[in-house]
Amino acid sequence: MAHFSKIASQSFKAVRSFKLRTFFCLISIALGIAAITTIVAAVEGAYKKAFEIVARFGPDSLLVFSGGEEARALGLRPKTITVDEVNAVREAFTRAYLVVPMISARNTSIHYKDKKYQTHVIGSTSDYSRAWSWPVVQGSDFTDEDVRGLRNVGLIGQHLMRELFGNEDPVGKYVLVKGIHVQIVGVLSERGTSPGGENLDDRIIMPLTTVMRKIQNETKYVTAFRIRFIDQENLYHHADELRTFLRLEHDLPITEPDDFRIITPKEIVKFLVALTGSLVTFLGITGIMSLVVAGFVLTNLFLLSVKERTSEIGIRRAAGAKKRDILLQFIGEAVIITTVGGLVGFLLSLLSANLLSYIAQFPIHFSWKAFAFAFLLSWIIGIIFGLQPARRAANLNPIEAIKG
């Protein structure tokens, strides 16, 4: 044990002595480790975010939008789902405990006193907050009577509340929505952003009938509906049944694509995995290239170091040092440098992750896995790329080395 401690001590001394070699090796390793560690953290972050969003979306829930994939690709929003169809779904699917229609009016002007703002107006039923597990934290929800009576009432999101009211309590106040005086009866809790980056707190929820008749001038069609099932384990079976049911309602031939879209929790996971994939590919190629370059930099600098230290190696061999001792010392030097490089790379990845989160709001999650991966990778690089110079040093002829 004392023997190995002595070799380790000599490795540390050599690392401190050859400062320029240590600096260049360390920086090259750190950059590669930073990129690779960020990948691990990005993948973990994406999956963590996906499961958070699935939990928020509701693992027992489906969301059905008007218009199929083709219309979506063309940027069209055709009206294909009616209020009557939503009611038919409510009657046909007895395992569904909530079926909530919604109609959307984006970029709608809303006024309060001298303040004007463009926001997202959503019309729905009194079950909207339950359907999205989105509680009202101030005031109260609107009622079925409000929906039946086409009343001008609304729930306001936190962002919109701050924009219009500042520190003022909005409950009971009136805002002007497209020329209609609407009383704010409640405030929704903070929700954050959607997977696509939309601010979910920038909205006002009003009775479905009010938005349809008074804002959209609509009597038949809705934008979407949300459905939640008692038996969560059969969700995807219910999704298939719902697809078949809506195709029959729309009288679609077998050859025709769906004119609606059913969003399931799986779709959310796919979206975030695809979003992560582009970053992983870019950083993966960059990281691997950086590590390969770093490895070659380390090998070449260590080979030069062996040449410079030929006399030292010869004297140590002549004094009784074995080939194995020289080999272990040089590998030890490489591992020390790459370990410090791994630590610096991990710190750099923390900075880059904060930058990604700030600029692109990309989900990054660092755990012990990212930390362990950084150091494991740095040790592997140190051993693999430090082995050739270590062997060359160990195989030097002591007499020739002393002469050199």
Image (spheres, rainbow, N blue to C red):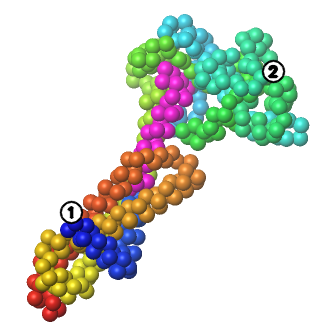
Question: Residue 387 or 195: which is nearer the viewer?
Answer: 387
Q: Amino acid at mark 1?
A: Met
Q: Which residue is nearer to you in this view: 226 or 46?
A: 46
Give the SS element for disc 2. loop
Please report whichever mark, 2 or 1, sits nearer to the chain's N-terminal start: 1
For the magenta stretch, what is the residue range? 36-65
Q: Which residue is mark 2?
A: 152
User: Which amino acid, by three-letter code, is at mark 2?
Assistant: Asn
Residue located farthest toward the bottom when viewing the structure as drawn: 403
Residue 400 % position (x, y): 11, 89
Q: Residue at x 83, y 31 (%)?
A: 169
Q: Nearer the viewer, mark 2 or mark 1?
A: 1
Q: In terms of image quadrants, where is residue 190?
A: top right
Residue underneath mark 1: 1
Q: Is residue 3 above or below residue 274?
A: below
Q: Is residue 62 magenta?
A: yes
